[in-house]
Image: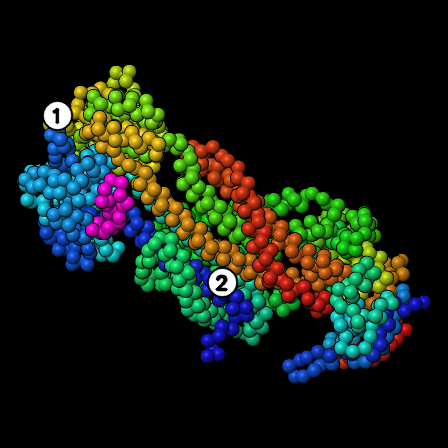
Amino acid sequence: MNFLVPRIKAWWLLCLASMITITIVAASQLFTQRISILLDRQAAELLAADMLIDSNDPMPASYRELAQRYGLQTAYTIGLRTAIFIQDEPQLIELKAVSAGYPLRGTLERKAGLFEPAQKVTQGPLSGEVWIDSKIAALLNQPIELGMQSLAANWVISYEPDRGGSLFNLAPRIMMHIDDLPATGLLVPGSRARYNLLLAGDAAALSRFAEDVKPRLSEGEKLQTLDNARPEMRNALERTRLFFALSIVLTLVIAMIAIAITAKYSASQEAVKVAVMRTFGISSRRLIRYYLLELLKVWLWALPLGLLAGYLAQFPLQWALGLWFGARLPETGLMPYLLAALIGFISLTGFSLPHLLNVLDTPPMQVLRQIRQSSTPRNVMLLVLSSLLTLFLVLLLIVNQFQLALMLFALVIVLAGFIPLVLKLILQLFSRFGRNRFWLNNYLLSRLLSGQRNALFVMSGFSLTLLSVLLISQVKDQLLEDWETQLPQDKPNYFLVNIPTAEAQPLSRFLQDNGVSTSQAYALVRTRLSAINQQDVKTLTLKTERGRHLLNHVFNLSFADQLPPDNQLLQGEWLDQHSVRSGFSVEQGMAEELGLKLGDELQFTLQGETFAAPVSSIRSVVWENFQPNFFILASRQLLEGRPQTWLMSAFIDDSHKALLKPLLQQHPSVTLLDISELMQRIKGIIQRASVALEFFFGFATLSAIIVLISALNTTNPMRETEIALLQALGANRRQKLQSQLAEFALMGVLVGVFAALFANLIGWFVGYRFFDLVYSFSVQLWVYSVFTSVVLITAFGTLFVYRSFSISPMRLLRS
Amino acid sequence: MDDCIVVSNLTKTVQAPEGRLTILQDINLKVKSGEALVISGESGSGKTTLMGLMAGLDKATSGEVILLGETLSDKNEEQRSAIRQGRVGFVFQSFHLVSGASALQNVMLPLELSGRTQAAQKAEQVLRSVGLGSRLHTAVELLSGGEQQRVAIARAYAVEPAILFADEPTGNLDTRTGQQITDLLFGLRDQSGTSLILVTHEDRLAERGDRQIKMSQGQILDSVG
């Protein structure tokens, strides 16, 4: 067994740093993969599935058979519009027939009566049952004529996970079992129905299924995943994923600083041994082989320990997050472990080998005569290139996208240069003050500025960690609290849709007279995009799934005399009611997907009639504001006189809920859509992601502590000499303690101030630039930042240098 | 003239892999105030250990050291440090200056540690006296070896010590610079009347002392002067 023990001095330290890196990669990969899968699943509730095929016509059975071959769960839904009679008045309804198994993701909620408590159920109506919307709750326990069938309504639906898609055209819902649909006679060839095949299962199987089924899909059949579903969801998820990627990168960078510092120390400890071996005539080639083997041994020690620690880290994580999410975290494969092993090896050799080669290149006499060794330019170049290449490789392996890896690499390089530079400048600035005294302030500053101290590395590592934690916290605040607080107090919680043109004004007046604030009323004209620049959209080929989806989209066109709130004009001009010209204002994302630019002509078809106009402006839309938002807004003159209904949003608080009953009685065709539930769900996803991230930054803090410990180990002989010198010069115990504790405390203060300052600056910039927020100075952030860093650095620092206080000053005579 | 150091029956042993190793054996020695005592001997003879024990930098296994009238054997490290503060100076072979600090700051350090006022003025004055008036604010790592040792000597003399211990002060210097440092050390000793305990293996340097003791295998072989 002895031959397995590496023969590198301080190998255990290198092993520890490597082990931590492997642990971080394994744990973070396992963690993020699990959370990512879980978040997808949580979000998938909004589709009631992981994926679905949407079609205007019945789908071939082969799709379901194919899905079953891939081990996926399936369910069918059929949606169609029909009318029922309520007190002899026709009422348009959205009928949804669901098969057994629906919903595949998420739960339905139903009530036995309008004011009864809601029950969560995982299965839709059974055969013979009918569930109805709360808007028509008056029909509960009464027979409803659905085509040729009369069925009794048993339950009120209080929550339906996949309700929506387009929020604005919702008539009251009636849900029934799919087996009961044929008997109604409502579904005949040519019926305008939507057929959905819902799919759920393992991510890999879903992906393989998607690849397999895509070429088989006919026109009008679309594969829908969460990514090409609702824009507000897509934005939330994209931000969440980006945060995760960034957090891993930041944590890893800090872990790699730890390896780099430890590798430098380990190599320096080998200098005498190498010099002696060189005097015996041992060749460089043989020494390189020797050290490669020794590094391999270090890796072999670090690997099982790191993987085990990464694996064990799952349990507290699973416990904590399982409780939070109310679900068991899904399993992952072997990939995180393999990746951790590979990254562990690359970072160990990439950072260690150049330092060892540098030692091999040093003339033995320099080492043996203890002449301070300086690296040759060739070796410095080798060290820099190897470190950069290692860093880039690790980033590439983690993010798995060349372009993103390159961007992150550039970011890390900028930060790696910027943070130490700023810290150094601050230290140099401070050292200009109080030149008439050396002890204690300037003594400490001279220690921190000493290149051999690695203090700038330690402070940079901690600053980066703390800055990341603070930024995540700030961004989270902006995403959640600020997002909410920036919305007015009376932010909309209801959409009123299907408002007949004649009722729009009276309805708005009714609400406002009763103290309810409403948005402007928007006309909705349902139409299809038929041509772009006179080219039929059917002949257009678009690269992205989302682009194709948009082409097949039923557009709710509207018009507005003024640019709607939270919309920003990016290009072109806004055409108001006074404009002679007519045109379309297109949302930025849609313009990008369809490749639209100013002046392109769009042609729409409505009931066999077409109308066309050029794109007159491109604007950005804040989808998350829960105001009525539109992909395309048209000039008033293009839509006037066309079949339309109206839409408005309103804030109806509890004290005004009593208005709803008379409102719906006076305006029976209006559908009231409660959007607060959707808002809560999106908030929930962001909230969970940010909690997960905060937990994850515990690993970054661990890395920063390893950087500190590595640096302390590296500089320990130097510290011991300094303490011995102070002792020889007559310093008492208090002064010796001061020299170390105050140094750590000063580092803590600098790190805390740096992190808080830049977190505030970046927060201000991001808020100002992207969220249009007013900057608010946060005292808590500064206190938290400085307190955390001072406590962490001082506690760990003292723990590691404490033994140095008993060092004998005789050391000075022996060195 | 009083004795500033009295050493009686001093023995130092350490635990080595092959058993207990005696480094110093039954040493008896007195140093008069203002005397320049040179301890010489070959490598491993115990001269540095003896100097460390005399300065209270280490504890003896048995025997006694009285430094400036204070018995060291019953004192802990903190108390021995208090005895040294402001009364004992050191010059080391490897200089042991505070890197990153200027020459002036290095000399200010022991003055400030012992609570002296106007440390900067005093340090500047001493540095000028060792010929470094033009290098006051230069970082010590930018100075030559000889200049660094001058800073170390200035640092030791700045507190106006009663005793100055110098361990191989010319060991890391070339002959010419070593000669200059030797002249400086003895010149300042002559001016200040400070006792000088100097450890060296160089005969040329040893001859400059008022008294020279030669050590071998942990014992005093010979005392000259």
Q: CA distance from mark 2 to mark 1?
A: 71 Å
**Majority SS type along the magenta span:** loop
> What residue lies at 31% left-to-right and 60% top-to-bottom?
A331
Could you tell me which residue is drawn at 25 percent across and 28 percent down? A662
Magenta stretch encompasses residue A542? no
Amino acid tagged 1: Glu
Q: Quadrant of residue A276?
A: bottom right
Residue A632 placement (x, y as % from top left): 25, 29
In the shown orientation, is residue A500 left or right of residue A242? left
Amino acid carrying mark 2 in the image = Ala
Above or below for B128 versus A335: above
Say which of A593 and A43 sits in front. Answer: A43
Q: Position of residue A762 (x, y in %)?
A: 48, 40
Q: Which residue is more in the foreground, A609 or A429? A: A609
In terms of image quadrants, where is residue A531?
A: top left
Give the colour scheme of this rendering: rainbow
Q: Which residue is mark 1?
A: A609
Whether marks 2 and 1 lie on the same chain:
yes
**Circle 1 sits in a helix, a strand or a loop, which is it?**
strand
Question: At x 68% / y 60%, what residue is drawn?
Answer: A722
| Mark 2, other Cα within 10 Å: few <14 / some 14–19 / many ≥20 | many
Q: Residue at x 86, y 66 (%)?
A: B68
The one nearer the camera, A387 or A598, is: A598
Q: Are marks 2 and 1 in contact (CB under 8 Å)?
A: no
Badge 2 or badge 1: first in the primary sequence: 2
Q: Which residues are magenta?
A: A103-123
Q: Which residue is label 2 attached to?
A: A17
- B52 w.r.t. A105: above or below: below
Determine the secondary structure under disc 2. Answer: helix
